Image: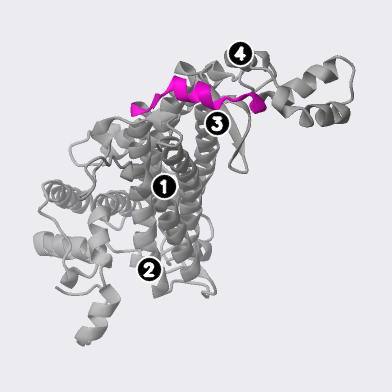
């Protein structure tokens, strides 16, 4: 298989294997983005007179066939292909002849891979956002269903004050909304087309970068050609940072579930269909998926560290080091999708054990409530605090549910704002799914078979 950079000499096989590594396997996920980018690029080359109408039609048919082969699992990377860009161009040359050699005009593999990763991320990040919001929705539903189910609140791992299952689940739903906002900000950073920056210094042709960006559904063009190259890895790191924040949320949730489902706590049970057993202990039912979710946050932080570690100290322009950011970036997006799906399934199977929860709401949880009763009777808080602290054994039992409803300020157990939470989750989900649908339709119009009038 000829290399796009071939100059008539043979590369040492050891060096070739080392440079390619397993990068080509990840390029199997970039076939569709590369085809889409090539279709838009070909349209632009025709627009500026580099390609004739017939040549454009041939390239469109050829690229369409590559995509069809890929969708059937018949267009796969091999080590000798080097990368997706080389494989696609070589296929076009083999099938179309001279016209296949024209597709690379005015671009470099440097801006090709930048574009492929941006397009890949445009769809994948939105898919992660949908999964995140679905998880947030399930937590909001769980909070609503158990809004006034009493539950001890903890500080320093010790019982602290009266709380509720609604407060607990609602907190995680709101945490995920903040994580969604971070992911949206990263999405916006990604939503600028780098194509046309070539090898970081542009090309001496009157290319229309804005036209290509419009065809591909980007917000616009990433302006400075050198910055486009320098942003390789930077944008990916921003996305993985947002993913890491969401995985930290899931890790905390997983730890709570693991703790609260132990026999010592017994606050929740999980469906048997989700648990695994022991090879030696017949009684064991292990919530292993939550242990893995807890661990996956560290894996995600590792992906972030890998990307940023590669970027540290690199000079301007393209450097081969950037190749090492592809695997952690793509793996991070897949890991996030899997983790949200697992956590949503787990939350949907959780059942509170109300008797155990109520039994855990022992009188000392109401010590602060009692202090504020004295404050309302005229005592200073500090005197009330000391008075109650000196007589903890004398605290009377309290109606837990009445105590929950008595907390009426914003965000407390009697005023959780779950209607608003549910509405915000639904609105964000509608926006995100709308973006996904619009993106799919935008890309469909680029494909062979779409009417000319449908193309942007």
Residue 324's label in the rendered image is 2
Q: Mark 3 points at which residue?
A: 171
Q: Looking at this view, is 246 or 400 the one in front? A: 400
Where is residue 41 drawn, in percent x and y?
Answer: 32, 53
Q: Circle 2 — which element?
A: helix
Residue segment shown in magenta = 349-365
Q: Is mark 1 on a helix, strand or loop?
A: helix
Quick one: label 2, few (<14), some, or many (20+) residues within 10 Å? some
Q: In this view, does 171 lie to the left or right of 110?
A: right
Where the C terminus falls, by quadrant?
Answer: top left
Marks 3 and 1: which is nearer the front? 3
In primary-sequence order, the first of circles 4 and 3 is 3
Task: Tell me the residue that label 4 is attached to.
Answer: 399
Q: Do the residues labelled 3 and 1 touch (CB within 8 Å)?
A: no
Locate residue 285, reporting x and y percent. 28, 39
Do the residues under discs 2 and 3 have CB atoms within 8 angstroms?
A: no
Tell us which disc is closer to us: 2 or 1: 2
Which of pointers 4 and 2 indicates the residue nearer the eye?
4
Q: Does the magenta stretch include residue 94?
A: no
- Measure how far apart labels 4 and 1 are at the Cα level: 62 Å
The quadrant the N terminus occupies is bottom left
């Amino acid at each position: 298989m000829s290399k796009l950079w071939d100059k008539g000499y043979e590369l040492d096989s050891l060096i070739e294997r080392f440079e390619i590594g397993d990068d080509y396997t990840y390029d199997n996920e970039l076939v569709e983005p590369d085809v889409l980018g090539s279709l838009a690029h070909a349209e632009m080359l025709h627009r500026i007179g580099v390609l004739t109408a017939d040549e454009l039609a041939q390239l469109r048919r050829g690229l369409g066939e590559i995509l069809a082969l890929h969708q059937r699992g018949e267009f796969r990377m091999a080590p000798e292909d080097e990368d997706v860009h080389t494989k696609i161009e070589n296929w076009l040359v083999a099938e179309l002849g001279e016209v296949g050699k024209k597709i690379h005009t005015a671009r470099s593999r440097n801006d090709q891979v930048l574009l492929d990763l941006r397009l890949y991320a445009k769809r994948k990040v939105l898919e992660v956002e949908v999964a995140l919001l679905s998880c947030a929705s399930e937590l909001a539903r769980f909070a609503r269903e158990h809004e006034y189910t009493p539950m001890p609140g903890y500080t320093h791992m010790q019982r602290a004050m009266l709380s509720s299952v609604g407060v607990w689940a609602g907190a995680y739903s709101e945490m995920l909304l903040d994580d969604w906002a971070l992911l949206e900000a990263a999405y916006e950073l990604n939503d600028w087309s780098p194509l046309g920056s070539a090898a970081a210094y542009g090309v001496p042709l009157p290319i229309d970068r804005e036209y290509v960006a419009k065809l591909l559904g980007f917000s616009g063009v990433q302006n400075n050609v050198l910055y486009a190259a320098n942003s390789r890895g930077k944008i990916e790191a921003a996305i993985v940072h947002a993913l890491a924040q969401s995985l930290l949320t899931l890790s905390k949730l997983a730890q709570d579930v693991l703790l609260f489902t132990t026999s010592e706590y017994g606050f929740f049970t999980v469906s048997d269909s989700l648990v695994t057993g022991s090879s030696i202990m017949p009684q064991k039912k292990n919530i292993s998926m939550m242990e893995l979710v807890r661990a996956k946050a560290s894996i995600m932080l590792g992906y972030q560290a890998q990307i940023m570690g590669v970027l540290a100290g690199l000079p301007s322009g393209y450097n081969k080091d950037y190749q090492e950011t592809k695997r952690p970036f793509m793996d991070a997006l897949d890991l996030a999708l899997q983790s949200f799906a697992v956590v949503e399934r787990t939350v949907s199977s959780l059942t509170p054990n109300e008797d155990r929860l109520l039994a855990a709401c022992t009188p000392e949880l109401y010590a602060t409530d009692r202090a504020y009763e004295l404050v309302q009777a005229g005592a200073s808080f500090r005197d009330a605090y000391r008075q109650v602290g000196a007589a903890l054994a004398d605290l009377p039992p309290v109606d837990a549910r009445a105590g929950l409803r008595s907390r009426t300020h914003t965000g407390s157990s009697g005023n959780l704002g779950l209607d608003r939470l549910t509405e915000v989750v639904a609105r964000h989900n509608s926006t995100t799914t709308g973006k996904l649908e619009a993106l799919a339709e935008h890309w469909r119009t680029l494909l062979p078979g779409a009417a000319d009038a449908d193309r942007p």
